[in-house]
Amino acid sequence: MPPSTERAVQPVIVLANRIGTAVSLPVVPCIATTRATTQLKGVTDPVKRKELVAGLYAVDPQYTAGKNVLLFDDLFRSGTTLGAITDVLLKAGKAASVRVLTITKTRSNQ
């Protein structure tokens, strides 16, 4: 059983499952958070964003070791979260590679 995610059924999981089914790829929600976190939405300082996500994510390498992983997220804002999760997948998760797919990107005022 994959590690649990912070919230029960997130819309991003629903989207990922539908996309995975459509393209015949398995979806494994294997990223877990290690602690409660605050929303990053209002945090514009890139250094502060990185501090908030440092050590926040964990993965069990039994799901990712040696595999090519497609990391899916519904929203790309600054790349901080996706970058942190990619690092965890490559280092602790021992993934062979990580590719990222996002559905939307927010506009930045910076």
Image (spheres, rainbow, N blue to C red):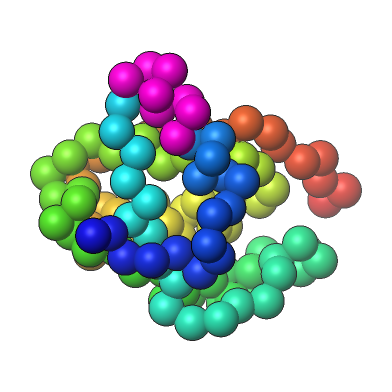
Tell me if residue 38 comes above or below residue 28 in the rendering.
Answer: below
Where does residue 28 sit, x and y in percent of width and height?
Answer: 32, 46
Who's the residue at 56% across and 81% down the image?
36
Where does residue 18 sit, x and y in percent of width and height?
Answer: 49, 28
User: Which residue is the extreme one toward the right?
Assistant: 109
Q: Nearer the viewer, residue 15 or 82?
A: 15
Who's the residue at 35% across and 39% down the image?
27
User: Which residue is the extreme one toward the top?
Assistant: 23
Asked where in the image residue 58 lies, by quadrant, the reply is bottom left
Span highlighted in magenta in the image: 17-24
Query: From this viewpoint, is residue 51 visible?
Result: yes
Where does residue 101 sit, x and y in percent of width and height?
Answer: 50, 32
Side of 11 where 57 appears, left or right? left
Tell me if residue 68 comes above or below residue 33 in the rendering.
Answer: above
Asked where in the image residue 14 lies, by quadrant, the reply is top right
The image quadrant where one finds the N terminus is bottom left
Query: From this viewpoint, is residue 94 visible?
Result: no
Q: Is residue 31 magenta?
A: no
Q: Is residue 18 magenta?
A: yes
Side of 19 where 104 appears, left or right? right
Who's the residue at 76% across and 62% down the image?
41
* Chief secondary structure of the magenta portion: helix
Tell me if residue 85 comes above or below residue 107 in the rendering.
Answer: below
Asked where in the image residue 73 lies, by quadrant, the reply is top right
Tell me if residue 38 comes above or below residue 27 in the rendering.
Answer: below
Who's the residue at 57% across and 44% down the image?
12
